[in-house]
Image (cartoon, helix red, strand yellow):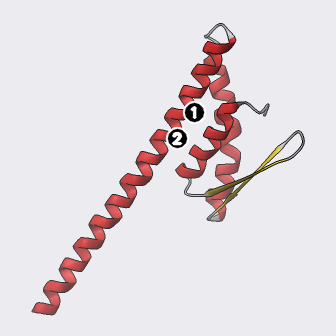
Amino acid sequence: MVHQGFIDTVALAMGAFFNCKLYSTRRAITIDRIFCGIAENAVTAAIVPEMVYNRILEWALAYKGISTFFSYCRGVADGLLSIARKERENEREEARRKEKEILAVREREEEL
């Protein structure tokens, strides 16, 4: 992939979607990205950004001019990251809710 500003955001979004940590290392002309987490998730998170990148570029072809093209790409990437973060927060809230329910059931059982 040609490195463009929005690809960093896409990589962050994929890390969030697949519950992985993302580590990046800049070299002279390349950027190495490493996803760490459950093996299947990390492999998927490493493969998907290229597909997303290609799809975003395909969609952006409808926009003429460099600034509108890039703004569209950036907007899609930011939207993906926002969705990924909301999903992650919803999952955390659901886990907290279930944990509270389990704790309440245990307390009732202990009282009985």
In space, the residues marked 2 and 1 are separated at their CA atoms by 6 Å
Residue furthest top in the image: 64
Residue furthest left in the image: 112
| Residue 7, image x, y percentages | 68, 36
Tell me: 28 left or right of 81: right
- Give the residue displayed 30% in from the left and 72% down from the top: 99
The circle drawn on residue 77 is 1
Check whether the beta carbons of the residues at disc 2 and disc 1 lie within 8 A of each other: yes
- Label 1: which secondary element: helix
| Residue 80, image x, y percentages | 52, 37
Q: Which residue lies under the disc numbered 2?
A: 81
- Bin the neighbour count of mark 2 within 10 Å (Cα to Cα): few under 14, some 14-19, many 20 and up: many
- Looking at the image, residue 97 lies above or below residue 7: below
Between 57 and 28, which is closer to the camera in this rendering?
Answer: 28
- Give the residue displayed 61% in from the left and 10% down from the top: 63
| Residue 17, image x, y percentages | 53, 49
- Looking at the image, residue 38 lies above or below residue 107: above
- Bin the neighbour count of mark 1 within 10 Å (Cα to Cα): few under 14, some 14-19, many 20 and up: many
**Label 2 sits on what residue type?**
Leu
Tell me: 15 left or right of 103: right
Between 45 and 12, which is closer to the camera in this rendering?
Answer: 12
Tell me: 97 left or right of 45: left
Which quadrant is the N terminus positioned in? top right
- Label 2: which secondary element: helix
**Label 1 sits on what residue type?**
Ala
- Looking at the image, residue 20 lies above or below residue 101: above
Tell me: 100 left or right of 71: left
| Residue 93, image x, y percentages | 33, 59
Which quadrant is the C terminus positioned in? bottom left
- Give the residue displayed 71% in from the left and 38% down from the top: 50
- Give the residue displayed 19% in from the left and 78% down from the top: 104
